[in-house]
Amino acid sequence: MKTGKVNPAALPVAIIGAQGMLGRELVAVLQSQGLPVCTLDLPEFDLTDHDHVVRRLKGITPRYVINAAAYTDVDGCEENAPIAYAINAEAVGVLAQTCRDIGAALVHYSTDYVFDGADPAGYAENAVPNPLSVYGKSKLEGERLLRQSSCRYLLIRTSWLFGPGRRDNVVEKIITRAKRDGKLKLVNDRWGKPTYAADLATKTVALMVAGDDEEGIHHLTNDTPTTGITWYEFGKEIMKLLGLDTELEACSSAEFPQKAMRPVHSLLVNTKELPLRSWREALADYLREVHPGQ
Ligand SMILES: NC(=O)c1ccc[n+]([C@@H]2O[C@H](COP(=O)([O-])OP(=O)(O)OC[C@H]3O[C@@H](n4cnc5c(N)ncnc54)[C@H](OP(=O)(O)O)[C@@H]3O)[C@@H](O)[C@H]2O)c1
């Protein structure tokens, strides 16, 4: 991803959604490597205000734009489809065209939810998507607009993201309920691959620095058995690591009906590079950071 400018290293990396769960980790990794960063987020920077987006990016002349912003409320997307498409699809098209025009490369994130999850063997980077939800459909449309834009891009699909940047992330939800109720039911008939936002941010920056050869679609999650793990197994590991004796009960997803349909086998298969470290190590690190001394 060379820009062809005189001193590309001096050009900033613009991070959209810099206050989000992944965005915060990206800012931390880039700053720790001494790279100039320009953070963009609501309310000052709204992806649905296309004129402002184009003007602002042209003013920054970034070397890379990282889009970590999205409408990520999966059930909310079912009720607000126009907003989901505006943020997860149309805005991505505008970003891609602008990046092409200003010679920046776009790093964009997508999701395991672009697949239907019917195949227990999982989904490689070139598998055919078939989203079940408005969220998945809007993210897939964003992918399509990105790929047809002829801008240089990294498209990173990830799944089951957790990190300290959002206090209501799935790990914290499990811990809060476990401590409050002393017992907990967790779904044991849906499989996925957890991803620690800090690990994803570090790998993203490594791919950017590696250059042109890394362009295209990547599937990045923490290393997880090929059949994935269930929320029940994830919760069991959290309880073990925190030394909580909460009574855990495995249940079916039918017991927790949700507006949006979710894939049963949410299994991104990475065929391109070394996997991130194991999900257990990543989870332990997260818990040490967020719950020190427990
Ligand atoms: N979370 C997961 O489990 C998961 C799984 C697979 C893939 N992904 C993908 O990974 C990426 C990062 O997800 P995340 O969980 O870090 O997201 P997040 O925590 O929900 O953060 C998204 C950020 O985007 C901002 N944003 C929302 N609408 C915007 C708009 N119109 N203009 C500008 N900024 C806007 C949000 O601001 P506000 O907070 O003010 O709304 C927030 O700062 C996304 O592409 C997501 O689709 C996430």
Image (cartoon, rainbow, N blue to C red):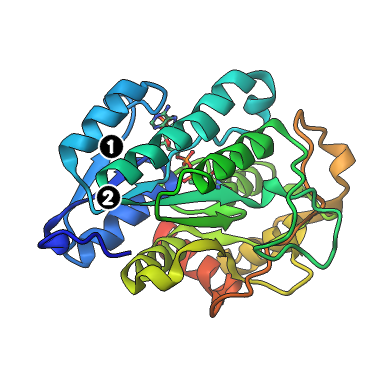
* Residue at 54% from the left image edge and 80% from the top image edge: 274
Q: Do the residues labelled 2 and 1 touch (CB within 8 Å)?
A: no
* Residue at 55% from the left image edge and 36% from the top image edge: 72
Q: Position of residue 132 (x, y in %)?
A: 78, 39
Give the SS element for disc 1. strand
Question: Residue 131 or 253: which is nearer the viewer?
Answer: 131
Q: Position of residue 286 (x, y in %)?
A: 47, 63
Quarter of the image for the N terminus: give it: bottom left
Mark 1 CB within 8 Å of ligand 1? yes
Question: Residue 97 or 222: which is nearer the viewer?
Answer: 97
Q: Give the quadrant of residue 97.
A: top left
Q: Residues within 10 Å of mark 2 (few under 14, many from 20)?
A: many
Q: Label 2 to label 1, Cα distance in Å?
A: 19 Å
Task: Give the residue type at disc 2.
Answer: Gly
Mark carried by residue 40: 1
Q: Give the quadrant of residue 16.
A: top left
Q: Which residue, given by chain and number where applicable, does mark 2 sit on?
A: 103
